[in-house]
Image (cartoon, rainbow, N blue to C red):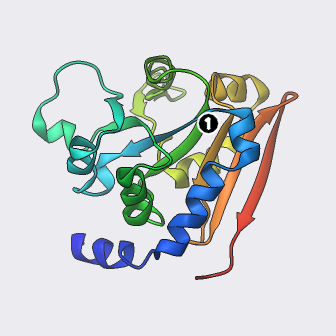
Amino acid sequence: MHESRESVASLVPEAMVDRLAASLWSRDAIHRAPSVFMLLDAARDERVLPLLRRSRLDYRCLFLGELAPELARVAPYLVHLGRRSLATREILRLGWGQSWGVFLHSDRILQDLRRHFRRFLQVKDESGKRFFFRYYDPRVLRAYLPTCEKNELDYVFGPVQMYLVEGESINTILEFRFQDEALLRRRIQWETV
């Protein structure tokens, strides 16, 4: 399974990485939010955590405390991406199309965002049973946000101005904003490279 992910991930050409970076750091986006972050799911690929550890990017695990190595390898992480960082380009090159995580814009610091995202790592069903909520999977978030009521959107967005997630095809990015008590969606689609 790892080999097939690696071969698919290596198909993301540099031109696509350039387009992704341009979308993440567009002038319009920069005007609204000075920083780009990513909720990164280490469970999606065994290369995620080593990549983070050798990067010079600021990141924190969403789980508290000292984690056993087995848990650290599959935990969700919040990372502050750098526009000119080689590690950011590597994350885009390897992770795009592989559901590695969700991008977001915010003017808050990493610790504030971590506190926000920790609040909904677990959810309860009608019977009160707790479940982990993998909202940091782009397939989950893009399906979940359109189903939310206004109060849920307010809660999920909190300090986040915009979420950006993979679309169903590799050449599509979806933007979600919560503005004027409504969820605004925009699809950006590029020509296939």
Number of labels in the image equals 1
Q: Residue furthest front?
A: 84
- State the image quarter where residue 172 is shown: bottom right
174 sits to left or right of 128: right
Disc 1 residue crowd, few under 14, some 14–19, many 20+, Cα 10 Å: many
Q: Is residue 78 above or below residue 16?
A: above
Q: What kind of residue is marked 1?
A: His
Q: Height in image: 95 above or below 62?
A: below
Closest to the observer, 114 or 31: 31
Q: Position of residue 170 (x, y in %)?
A: 56, 71
Quarter in which the C terminus is drawn? bottom right
- Residue placed farthest to the right in the image? 180
For residue 74, which quarter of the picture? top left
Residue 110, horizontal then vertical, whole percent: 45, 24
Residue 56 appears in which quarter of the rendering? top left
In the rendered view, tell whether residue 105 sits above or below residue 170. above
Give the farthest residue toward the bottom: 193
Q: Is residue 177 above or below residue 123?
A: below
Image point (43%, 18%), residue name? 111
Q: Give the position of the N terminus as an image quadrant.
A: bottom left
Q: Nearer the viewer, residue 45 or 83?
A: 83
Query: Is 164 displayed left or right of 120 in the figure?
Result: right
Residue at point 62%, 48% (across, down): 25
The image shows residue 24 at horizontal and vertical percentages of 61, 50
**What is the x, y in percent for residue 112?**
49, 17
Of helix, strand and loop, which one carries label 1?
strand
Residue at left offset 57%, top offset 21% = 108
Q: Residue at coordinates 78% horizontally, 27% vertically from top-left?
A: 150
On the image, numbered disc 1 is attached to which residue?
Answer: 105
